[in-house]
Amino acid sequence: MFSRTLFVSLTLLLLSTTWLTQASGQDSGFQFARVWYESHPGLRNNAWATDYPTAEYNLHEAISRTTGLQLEGPPIVVSLTDDRIFEYAVLYLTEPGYWRTNEEEVANLRRYLDRGGFLIIDDFHDYGRGHVGPQWNNMYDNIKRVYPDREPVELTADHPIWQIYYDVDPDAAISTKNGGSRRWGGMRFSPEDDIYYAVFDDAGRPTIVICYNQDIGDGWEWPGGRNLGSASTVSFQMAINFIFYTLTH
């Protein structure tokens, strides 16, 4: 009898190739794509490139070592105005507290998501669970431009996205925004402070996953350092679950 891991790996090998063949007309594997964007004037330049490119190269290595998913490397960077985004099943956007969109980007991202694409938003924080601030507000404003009629909903631990390949407990996961020793705004983030949200389509499929008060990309970049402990492992597991879920749904 096949194990669940082997079954999922074989299924993904087929589905990822099918998804990309339909999108690009070519038979190819999964390729990680990071979103390039312009920051708001006067704010942090090149925020889109945080943890780049080490994070995605390490993630590709983790996928290669632990799954049967076919990879088509290397990871790339793409603008939301570029129609090449339709060739990639997953897009990754970091530091959304600085993210600025224009009408063309909003329209293209909406088309991408409505056609079955998936966006991971990561690496931003404000003040901990129960409190939002300027970084959340900026991210939220951009999401509402894309989906005026939808709201982010907390992605709780009982959602199957957390068990599709690895069994991940998001409530117990350490926030890499803390790193075991660092403090933000006079406080130390606890495992209860990192929150995960999703924006769902009409069929209940997550089109966007939002990692708030969290930075899973830091766990990819520093798999054994910065006092992250097991956070790097969980960061890889979360990413692989997100990727597997969208390829199979």
Image: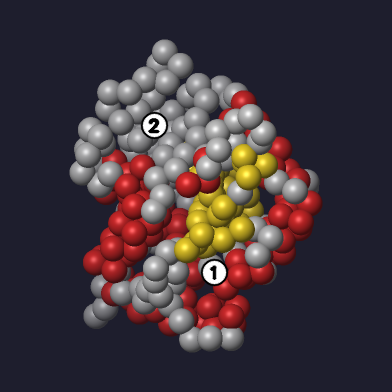
Task: Residue 163 in the image: state x and y as whole percent.
Answer: 38, 56
Relative to 117, 167 lies left or right: left
Which residue type carries mark 2? Lys
Viewer-side residue, 93 vs 160: 93
- Label 2 CA crowd tier, 10 Å (few <14, some 14–19, many 20+): many
The residue type indicated by label 1 comes to Tyr
Residue 18 x, y percent position in the rendering: 51, 82
Q: Are marks 2 and 1 in contact (CB under 8 Å)?
A: no
Badge 2 element: loop
Residue at 42% from the left image edge and 21% from the top image edge? 184
Nearer the N terminus, badge 2 or badge 1? 1
In the displayed structure, would residue 35 be above or below residue 137?
Answer: below
Quarter that holds the N terminus: bottom left
The quadrant where residue 205 appears: bottom right
Label 1 Cα neighbours within 10 Å, binned few <14 / some 14-19 / many ≥20: many
- Marks 2 and 1 sit apart, C-alpha to C-alpha, by 28 Å
Location of mark 2 (residue): 177
* Label 1: element kind: loop
- According to the image, label 1 marks what residue? 88
Q: Is residue 41 above or below residue 183?
A: below
Left or right, 22 with reference to 241: right
Say which residue appears at 34% left-offset and 63% top-offset: 60
What residue is rendered at 32% in x and 47% in y? 221
